[in-house]
């Protein structure tokens, strides 16, 4: 039996102010897809290319991974084929990076941004593709 495809996965962040969060992600080039209600929203979806993020204010403080486990702080990995170009684009917009573009110890190339609620997003890609079994 063939497996059904999965097109994407989207994190859902609990935030303190949906409007503030929308503004932050719009600075990153995300578009607003959904906002409910139109005035003083408690829920929104932002999207850029294939990346989609759901945000919701439920009157509970945000609890990003970094507050629970400083050694495992990423809340989302955002795969981008050209992290260098994305970093240059965002830097030109005046976006502040929480960790600059670099090669990581775990084989990735990318950078980190921290949103207004403390969620840490890594934008990057693997530095290289692992060798196939025939190449190893």
Image (tube, rainbow, N blue to C red):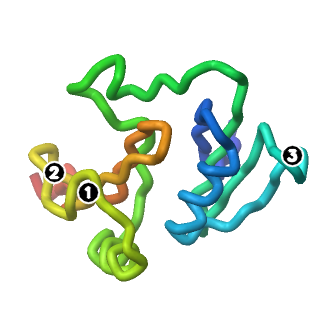
Q: CA distance from mark 2 to mark 1?
A: 6 Å
**The quadrant where residue 74 appears:** top left
Query: Is 3 left or right of 123, judged from the image as shown?
Result: right
Determine whether the residue tagged by mark 2 lies in a helix, strand or loop. Answer: loop
Can you say whether 40 is above or below 32 in the image?
above
Residue found 65% across the figure and 55% down from its top: 22
Which residue is the site of mark 2?
A: 107
Residue 44 on image: x %, y %: 75, 47
Name the image quarter holding the N terminus: top right
Category of crowding for the residue at label 3, using alpha-carbon neighbours closer than 10 angstroms: few (below 14), some (14–19), many (at least 20): few
Q: Residue at x 33, y 75 (%)?
A: 91
Mark 3 / mark 2, whichever is N-terminal: 3
Tag 3's secondary structure? strand
Marks 1 and 3, Cα distance to the nearest angstrom?
36 Å
Q: At which x and y percent is residue 129? A: 23, 59
According to the image, label 3 marks what residue? 36
Residue visible at 60% across and 49% down?
21
Say which of marks 3 and 2 sits in front.
Answer: 3
Q: Report helix, strand or loop for mark 1.
A: strand
Could you tell me if the residues under marks 2 and 1 are in contact, i.e. CB atoms within 8 Å? yes
């Amino acid at each position: 039996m063939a497996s059904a495809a999965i097109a994407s996965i989207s994190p859902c962040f609990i935030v303190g102010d949906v409007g503030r969060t929308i503004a932050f992600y719009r600075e990153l080039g995300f578009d607003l897809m959904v906002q409910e209600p139109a005035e003083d929203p408690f829920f929104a979806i932002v999207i850029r290319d294939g990346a989609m993020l759901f945000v919701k204010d439920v009157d509970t403080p945000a609890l990003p991974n970094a507050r629970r486990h400083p050694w495992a702080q990423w809340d989302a990995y955002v795969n981008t084929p050209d992290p260098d170009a994305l970093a240059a684009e965002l830097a030109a917009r005046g976006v502040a990076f929480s960790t600059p573009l670099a090669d990581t110890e775990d084989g990735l190339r990318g950078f980190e941004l921290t949103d207004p609620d403390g969620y840490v997003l890594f934008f990057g890609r693997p530095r290289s593709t692992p060798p196939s079994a025939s190449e190893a």
